[in-house]
Image: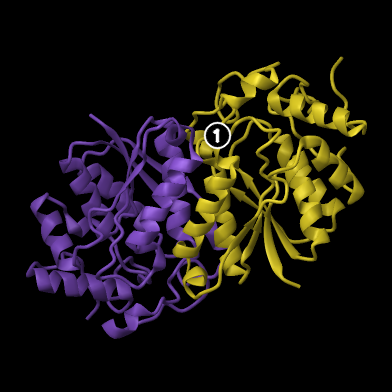
Chain colours: A yellow, B purple
Amino acid sequence: MKRAVILLSGGLDSTTCLAIARKQGFDLFALTVNYGQRHVFELQSAKNVALSLDIEKHSVLDIDLAQFGGSALTDDIEVPKDRVESEMANIPATYVPARNTVLLSVALARAETLDSFDIFIGVNALDYSGYPDCRPEYIESFERTANLATKAGVSGKNFHIHTPLINMTKAEIIKSGTKLGVDYGLTFSCYDPQETGAPCGHCDACILRLKGFKEAGIPDPLNYPD
Amino acid sequence: MKRAVILLSGGLDSTTCLAIARKQGFDLFALTVNYGQRHVFELQSAKNVALSLDIEKHSVLDIDLAQFGGSALTDDIEVPKDRVESEMANIPATYVPARNTVLLSVALARAETLDSFDIFIGVNALDYSGYPDCRPEYIESFERTANLATKAGVSGKNFHIHTPLINMTKAEIIKSGTKLGVDYGLTFSCYDPQETGAPCGHCDACILRLKGFKEAGIPDPLNYPD
């Protein structure tokens, strides 16, 4: 079995990505980064999700990007609420500076120590918030950089950044994960959860999630406030 | 004054790079990453060096790459000693998987929160240990990736990764830093220091450093074992 590293946040997308990677037969090493996100319930979700899909090899790495601030996810900046889809093309305050580059760089470090050339990330460029580091051209550029960066890369082998969700709608992602046995009740998407851990229902992540479940014709197992 | 982020390890190269960036008139934000290196004396050197060059803005970020292992700098693997120069083209056990990609990615995150588009890194592709992530083609690729990755980059501005040392010999680096008032007695290069913090004198970093001082005709202020 080929080894692969998968970035797992515990959200809907990365969890579905994990189920797809497992189905493809990889020996998976999950990696969750605690970057100081205020939606820290994500971390517990990541652990629960990994266990539910029988992923025993799961590392959690702390990188305190919150000390730099600059994002509604790590700093005292308001999370935008009730944005309509046409607004989502504008990069919102929840953008975390260089987040996916930080995540992919540590996944690359992890992969190289495992003699693995396969990295999975659940980015999506359709039903998303306009983050630049979710676009195919960014992923391709990171892949080229990875091959120049590493001892493994210069040895002639090539890293492959797998993005199975990149061209899927949220509804397609949910249908696909449901077929693969994902329990979406364990996943966590909200950027601004209530103290109880309940999702807000109004941030971009909740809006896109709710729309996806609706379009998929599948009930979202999470409890939203009325 | 334009803001710039500078990666500072406390070694000879990054310290000289800092002095050059200061001379160029940037408002500098130093960033040191504690990645679990066994030569942890580096971290104290980074702090001393920053203070000696009047750099008040200095962040230290923990990223525990040691939990992944895979390098003589972070794991229980022997540091190669007394390699001759012809051997240094082979990437040694001190190579840390994807290190510069991890360092540059967090420097990019830091820069974006500061509205800075300038990042300095003291990589050197002449008197070096053959690390792939010190080569110009790698740096150029990371720069392209950074511009695709970020909100700042897609806004039309361009990040610039400054590598003032990349084509200098170690002797030229030392002469250049000496002219700029660098106190090399504060810097730390050894990969395998003694318990007292004294350099070993036999690892690649010590060999390249000693050769550089010798060729520059300047005494190395550090004390080496006999």
Q: How many numbered discs?
A: 1
Rendered image quadrant of residue B21: top left
Decide: is A28 above or below A192: below
Determine whether, in the image, residue B39 is placed left or right of residue A6: left
Residue A66 percent across, percent down from the top left: 53, 34
| Depth check, front residue: A167 or A95 | A167
Q: At which x and y percent is residue A177?
A: 85, 46
Relative to residue B207, is residue A46 drawn left or right?
A: right
Place residue A221 in its image quadrant. top right
Q: Camera-side residue: A97 or A123?
A: A123
Residue A159 appears in the rendering: yes
- Quick check: B152 left or right of A17? left
Q: In the rendered image, which residue does mark 1 sit on?
A: A96
Q: Is residue B118 left or right of residue A162?
A: left
Three-letter amino acid code at disc 1? Answer: Val
* Chain designation of label 1: A
* Picture residue at 89% right of the left edge, 44% below the top: A178
Residue B174, how many percent across, how many down?
Answer: 15, 61
Residue B202 locus on image (x, y percent): 30, 79
- For image coordinates 53% across by 59% down, the residue present is B65
Q: What kind of element bears circle 1?
A: loop
Q: What residue sits 39% from the left and 37% below the top?
A: B111
